[in-house]
Image: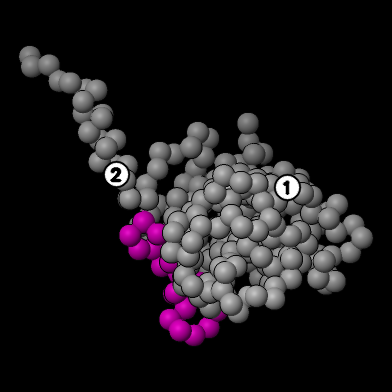
């Protein structure tokens, strides 16, 4: 019987699957893919403005409307959520967490900003509006986004009312929702979603083209 070089086959497969520039990465230990790279199975919401294409989820409002929201079908409480995103010039989007399927996720849940901070139209933003900020509640550190058009890597870790956000390897938020708002919110508005500890995770369209890939989650409530 002819011997088969198994290690060589495995190496060839790995090279093929994880070719540089393909956007594909080995799955992190304990994480589950939320996007299969082919279609929007497992997601609910606006599947007209959001589409699966070339291993990415692309929100494209086609020049009108906000693009709407696209949420995970399942709800999550404590989690580690990792994803990559690519901004277009002046792009504005958001990541909703602990959100219901109805209402403005920035208030009935929490919204984490996804934003091209370098655009001139955003020259006078409030501190809680820059990329990575918990909208209206917690400002993020600035200066860690890659140039527009390049892919960014982001990690969102939520445990109870605490949140940590890492952008391209740097921690830009490390705070507590309830502690940060105990004397009132930064935007002086009501945020009933701060009391929610479970809900959907989703992309919140604001009228601009943004691309997402390598979307995965680790449910921290499971041992």
Quadrant for the C terminus in the image: top right
Quarter of the view holding residue 66: bottom right
The disc placed on residue 106 is: none
The answer to whether residue 40 shows anywhere in this view is: no
Residue 25 lies, in percent from the top left, at 40, 43
Q: Residue at x 32, y 42 (%)?
A: 18
Q: Is 182 placed above or below 59 here?
A: above
Q: Which residues are magenta?
A: 46-66
Task: Tell whether 103 sits left or right of 34.
Answer: right
In 3D space, how far apart are the residues under numbered discs 1 and 2 (Cα atoms)? 34 Å
Give the residue at mark 1: 174
Residue 128 lies, in percent from the top left, at 73, 65
Give the mark nearest the N terminus, 1 or 2.
2
Q: Residue at x 15, y 20 (%)?
A: 4
Q: Helix or strand or loop: what does disc 1 sit on?
A: strand
Give the residue at mark 2: 19
Q: Residue at x 17, y 21 (%)?
A: 5
Q: Is 80 placed above or below 6 here?
A: below
Q: Helix or strand or loop: what does disc 2 sit on?
A: loop
Quadrant for the N terminus in the image: top left
Number of numbered discs overlaid on the protein picture: 2
Residue 105 is one of the magenta-drawn residues: no
């Amino acid at each position: 019987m002819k011997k088969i070089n198994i290690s060589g086959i495995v190496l060839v497969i790995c090279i093929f699957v994880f070719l540089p520039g393909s956007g594909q990465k080995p799955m992190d230990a304990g994480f589950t893919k939320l996007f299969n790279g082919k279609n929007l199975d497992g997601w609910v919401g606006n599947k007209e403005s959001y589409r699966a294409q070339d291993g990415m989820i692309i929100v494209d409002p086609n020049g009108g409307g906000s693009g709407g929201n696209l949420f995970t079908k399942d709800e999550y409480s404590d989690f580690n959520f990792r994803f990559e995103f690519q901004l277009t010039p002046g792009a504005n989007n958001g990541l909703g967490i602990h959100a219901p399927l109805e209402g403005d996720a920035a208030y009935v849940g929490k919204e984490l900003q996804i934003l091209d901070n370098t655009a001139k139209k955003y020259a006078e933003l409030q501190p809680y509006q820059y990329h990575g900020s918990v909208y209206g509640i917690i400002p993020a550190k600035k200066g860690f986004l890659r140039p527009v058009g390049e892919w960014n890597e982001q990690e969102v870790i939520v445990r109870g009312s605490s949140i940590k956000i890492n952008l391209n390897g740097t921690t830009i938020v490390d705070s507590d929702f309830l502690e940060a708002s105990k004397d009132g919110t930064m935007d002086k508005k009501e945020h009933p979603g701060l009391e929610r500890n479970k809900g959907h995770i989703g992309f919140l369209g604001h009228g601009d083209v943004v691309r997402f890939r390598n979307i995965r989650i680790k449910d921290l409530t499971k041992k």
